[in-house]
């Protein structure tokens, strides 16, 4: 069997007396899609930031393609090599894109940093086509694009470095429902075409159901349930997972009953 694209082993991260991540372990197969689900404060985003390298764990390991990622990287070449392993797409692409810079310039600069010996022009056209943006979008600035188009640019920039793992932190949460569906379909196509592995961080069980093979559920920094997405969402074993499913509005939904169940858990 091949090494997983990503393996997380017993990660911990505390902020004072609060253990935001408490012994988290999971594996993401090559070409696979894993969801991390939980409410605000569950530790899912902190876990993602440790995987990407935006935060340091107090203990534990992050292994990408069989190679342990060091907690600190020295030198520009080392930082760029690390960035090529794992990329992240954030919830609000407007905050992660320079409003003064055109789409083409964003992609060219990324390619220049990571692949200075390559001609960027063909790759820019390929990336725009890959994320479903017309060629004329290359001259646009973020403020001239819709939310869905900006997210496509953010995805294209992340894919430009040819990462093994793409971490998507609530990447469709700020979009309209119809645009969410377009972006999720796009991501499914990209995974099929490139073999990139996805780590989805979300509170939305609908997103998990659509685009992940496996899921872990986090609460208070710990993994409380894990398994194939279809199994976990169809027959959850943990009361908290059942509560998350019951919290999704549906016919006969009683928010007061859900609130009482949450307090009792």
Image (spheres, rainbow, N blue to C red):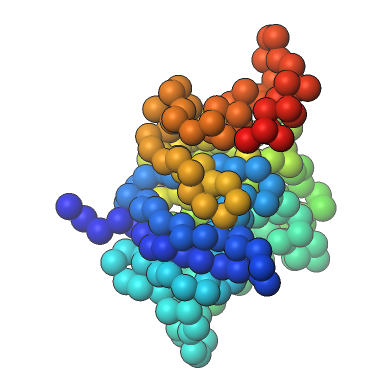
137 or 255, nearer to the observer: 255
Q: Tell whether 66 sits left or right of 163.
A: left
129 or 232, nearer to the observer: 232
What residue do we see at 69% from left, 40% from top? 173
**Which quarter of the image is occupied by the C terminus?**
top right
| Among the 4 quarters of the image, the one containing residue 176 | top right
Location of residue 201 in the rendering, given as x and y in whole percent from the top left corner: 57, 48
Asked if residue 261 shows in the view, the reply is: yes
What residue do we see at 73% from left, 52% from top? 92
As drawn, the residue found furthest toward the front would be: 264
Location of residue 142 in the rendering, given as x and y in whole percent from the top left corner: 76, 55
What residue do we see at 54% from left, 46% from top? 218
| Among the 4 quarters of the image, the one containing residue 239 | top right
What residue do we see at 39% from left, 53% from top? 26
200 or 37, nearer to the observer: 37
Location of residue 244 in the rendering, given as x and y in whole percent from the top left corner: 61, 31
Figure label count: 0
Asked if residue 36 shows in the view, the reply is: no
**Vertical placement of residue 263 versus 159, above or below:** above
As drawn, the residue found furthest toward the bottom would be: 75
Q: Tell whether 112 sits left or right of 252.
A: left
As drawn, the residue found furthest toward the left would be: 1
195 or 235, nearer to the observer: 235
């Amino acid at each position: 069997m091949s090494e997983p694209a990503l393996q997380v082993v017993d990660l911990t991260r505390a902020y004072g007396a609060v253990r935001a991540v408490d012994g988290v372990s999971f594996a993401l197969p090559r070409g696979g899609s894993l969801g991390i689900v939980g409410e605000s404060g569950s530790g899912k985003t902190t876990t993602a930031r440790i995987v990407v390298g935006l935060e340091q764990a107090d203990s534990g390991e992050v292994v990408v393609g069989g190679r342990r990622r060091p907690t600190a990287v020295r030198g520009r070449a080392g930082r760029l090599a690390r960035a090529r392993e794992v990329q992240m797409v954030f919830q609000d692409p407007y905050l992660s894109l320079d409003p003064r810079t055109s789409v083409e310039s964003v992609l060219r600069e990324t390619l220049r940093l990571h692949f200075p010996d390559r001609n960027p022009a063909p790759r820019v056209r390929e990336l725009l086509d890959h994320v479903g943006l017309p060629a004329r979008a290359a001259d646009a600035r973020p403020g001239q694009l819709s939310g869905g188009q900006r997210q496509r640019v953010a995805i294209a920039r992340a894919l430009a470095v040819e990462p093994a793992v793409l971490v998507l932190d609530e990447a469709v949460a700020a979009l309209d429902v119809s645009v969410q569906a377009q972006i999720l379909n796009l991501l499914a196509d990209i995974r099929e075409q490139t073999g990139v592995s996805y780590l989805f961080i979300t509170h939305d069980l609908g997103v998990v159901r659509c685009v992940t093979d496996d899921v872990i559920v986090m609460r208070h920094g710990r993994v409380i349930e894990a398994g194939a997405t279809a199994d976990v969402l169809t027959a959850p074993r943990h009361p908290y997972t059942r509560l998350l499913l019951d919290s999704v509005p549906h016919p006969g939904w009683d928010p007061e009953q859900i609130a009482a169940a949450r307090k009792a858990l």
